Image (cartoon, grey):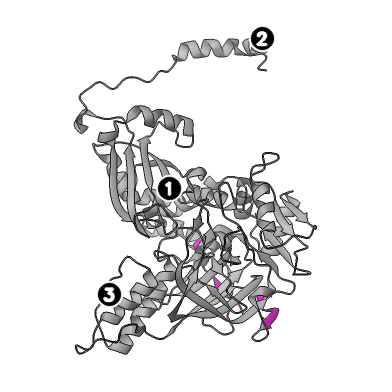
């Protein structure tokens, strides 16, 4: 059953024994993060520990704070209403397998599927619980128990927001998840990394305002330093009638933004998925839920947000304003460094009565985001296979914080195919950030790191089988030679063929014969008893 809002989700967690209430007073400055970190890494009980509902937050009497809601495989499955994450992948695969109807009978057969697809599209309703309290004046971001997670963080950060923007060109909405450093009561940093959709909406708005003010019709390119400052400088350098604007000129204007906090789990999860560019996240949430997401219009900006949200922040970012954001203790296990980012100005806050503040922490894995990332891995494998059909399976190890390592198995059909797959992965959306790609044969279980280590270390000649390339890297990569630009490595650990220049015989793997295994299987019960293994 889909959840209408965060409160139904919390009730479901409670019924499933997946929630613990903390009534001891805790400080949102560091203490909540330390408690959650200990719970998520606890060796006792289920991996990831329970979801936590803090009900006595220092400085915020009556407030409740939810954290670690996605912090286990069982909770991810509960959030998506499945017994296995592969069920969602199978549903995606089913829709991808639809072929164009060849006749009337085929068209009739497609009707039930088309009807089901119609359930996924979001619908706008007149009002919703997020409008129970509307505050155009006398509001503050500090009214909510926003966390400072780590000692060297620059301050408090909103860490689980669904940030809604609209493409100035197409009018399509995007829902992304970008951390927001709270500067004061009404402003926050908007951490739009260079390659994120929200950042592209900002750049497109910048282009359009500059073209309007300059009358220019050429498209700028953006140098590799800070993307927001460089975008302004590059557009500034364009001329109209041969005249150049003074140094420091930046187009004026605003980009409207809405931020939903405390949404039901499918909406929250959809904000992090690597969706195809033209597929709206509200549609993805509807697909995951099996029912449409109800949306309401904002009060002060032309955007729509989930009607059941606990808290909605409305506002804008100026095109001519950047401010230092960070440091921030990130999911890499290191602090991401300070940099310049746009500033979000709040114009209105709407919320439910007694809103529940939903948040998360990131840091050295495993944390809550590890289980969200593994869900993305399982669910979106069918979409990767659209572009890379020889893919059998992938593994993004939690310990490598996802973008640092991808292990893939393939059905190898021709020489050089492993290298083709590496380059295909580096061309896929957020997969372009993958620092290391390891390609193995289809008979290797990529989920078994011991088997992968054995096969990779035995199957490669390092000089022959390791490939390096340059390209975009994650903004959080502190080791890259330049911000957002560095090298990647691919390892071809497949068996080498003579057509790949390998003239030596490839040895057989050690495997016991079937007859002997069957004989020992028949005796194993008594032997195990004698060994004390029963």
In depth, the one of 357 and 265 nearer the eye is 357
Residue 192 picture location, percent across and down = 46, 68
Identified at 51% across, 59% down, the residue is 272
The answer to which image quadrant residue 228 occupies is: bottom left
Badge 2 or badge 1: first in the primary sequence = 1
Q: CA distance from mark 2 to mark 1?
A: 46 Å
Identified at 24% across, 86% down, the residue is 244
- Which segment did they paint magenta? 117-134
In depth, the one of 452 and 104 nearer the eye is 452
Residue 474 picture location, percent across and down = 41, 57
Task: State the quadrant of the C terminus.
Answer: top right
Q: Which mark is residue 404?
A: 1
Position above or below: 83 against 52: above
The answer to which image quadrant residue 441 occupies is: top left
Position above or below: 448 against 187: above
What residue is pinned by disc 3? 220
Position above or below: 466 against 28: above
Badge 3 or badge 1: first in the primary sequence = 3
Mark 2, Cα crowd under 10 Å, few <14 / some 14-19 / many 20+, is few
Residue 290 shows in the view: no
Q: CA distance from mark 3 to mark 2?
A: 76 Å
In depth, the one of 279 and 71 nearer the eye is 71
Badge 3 or badge 2: first in the primary sequence = 3
Residue 93 shows in the view: yes
Q: CA distance from mark 3 to mark 1?
A: 31 Å
SS category of the residue bearing label 2: helix
Whether the magenta-drawn stretch holds residue 124 is answered as yes
What residue is pinned by disc 2? 530
Residue 193 falls left or right of residue 215: right
Residue 27 picture location, percent across and down = 72, 62
- Give the total of numbered labels: 3
């Amino acid at each position: 059953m889909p959840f209408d809002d965060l409160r139904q989700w919390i009730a479901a967690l409670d019924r499933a024994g997946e929630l613990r209430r903390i009534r001891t007073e805790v400080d949102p400055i560091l203490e909540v993060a330390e408690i959650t970190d200990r719970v998520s890494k606890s060796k006792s009980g289920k991996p990831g520990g329970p979801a936590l509902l803090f009900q006595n937050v220092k400085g915020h009497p009556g407030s409740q704070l939810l954290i670690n809601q996605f912090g286990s495989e069982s909770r991810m499955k509960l959030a998506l209403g499945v017994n296995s994450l592969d069920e969602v992948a199978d549903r995606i695969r089913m829709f991808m397998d639809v072929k164009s109807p060849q006749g009337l009978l085929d068209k009739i057969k497609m009707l039930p599927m088309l009807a089901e697809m119609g359930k996924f599209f979001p619908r706008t309703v007149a009002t919703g619980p997020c409008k129970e309290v509307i505050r155009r004046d006398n509001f503050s971001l500090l009214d909510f128990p926003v966390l400072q997670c780590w000692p060297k963080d620059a301050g408090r950060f909103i860490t689980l927001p669904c940030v809604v923007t609209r493409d100035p060109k197409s009018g399509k909405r995007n829902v992304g998840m970008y951390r927001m450093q709270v500067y004061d009561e009404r402003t926050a940093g908007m951490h739009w990394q260079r390659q994120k959709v929200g950042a592209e909406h900002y750049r497109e708005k910048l282009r359009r305002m500059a073209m309007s003010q300059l009358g220019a019709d050429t498209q700028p390119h953006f140098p590799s330093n800070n993307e927001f400052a460089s975008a302004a400088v590059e557009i500034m350098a364009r001329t109209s009638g041969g005249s150049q604007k003074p140094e420091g000129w930046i187009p004026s204007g605003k980009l409207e933004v809405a931020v939903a906090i405390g949404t039901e789990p499918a909406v929250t999860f959809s904000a992090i998925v690597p969706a195809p560019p033209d597929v709206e996240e509200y549609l993805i949430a509807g697909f995951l839920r099996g029912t449409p997401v109800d949306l309401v219009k904002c009060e002060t900006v032309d955007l729509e947000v989930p009607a059941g949200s606990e808290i909605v922040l409305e506002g804008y970012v100026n095109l001519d304003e950047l401010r230092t954001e960070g440091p921030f203790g990130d999911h890499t296990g290191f602090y991401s460094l300070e940099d310049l980012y746009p500033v979000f100005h709040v114009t209105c806050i709407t919320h439910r009565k007694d809103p529940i503040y939903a948040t998360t922490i990131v840091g050295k894995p495993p944390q809550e985001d590890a289980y969200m990332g593994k869900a993305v891995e399982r669910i979106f494998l069918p979409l990767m296979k659209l572009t890379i059909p020889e893919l059998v399976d992938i593994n993004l190890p939690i310990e490598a914080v996802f973008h640092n390592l991808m292990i893939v198995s393939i059905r190898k059909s021709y020489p050089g195919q492993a290298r083709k797959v590496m380059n295909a992965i580096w061309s896929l959306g957020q997969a372009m950030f993958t620092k290391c790609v390891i390609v193995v044969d289809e008979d290797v279980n990529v989920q078994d790191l011991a088997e992968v280590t054995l096969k990779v270390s035995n199957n490669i000649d390092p000089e022959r089988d390791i490939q390096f390339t340059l390209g975009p890297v994650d903004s959080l990569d502190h080791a890259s030679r330049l911000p957002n630009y560095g090298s990647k490595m691919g390892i071809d650990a497949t068996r080498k063929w003579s057509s790949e220049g390998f003239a030596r015989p490839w040895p057989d793997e050690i495997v016991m014969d079937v007859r002997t295994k069957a004989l020992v299987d028949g005796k194993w019960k008594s032997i195990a008893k004698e060994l004390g293994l029963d």
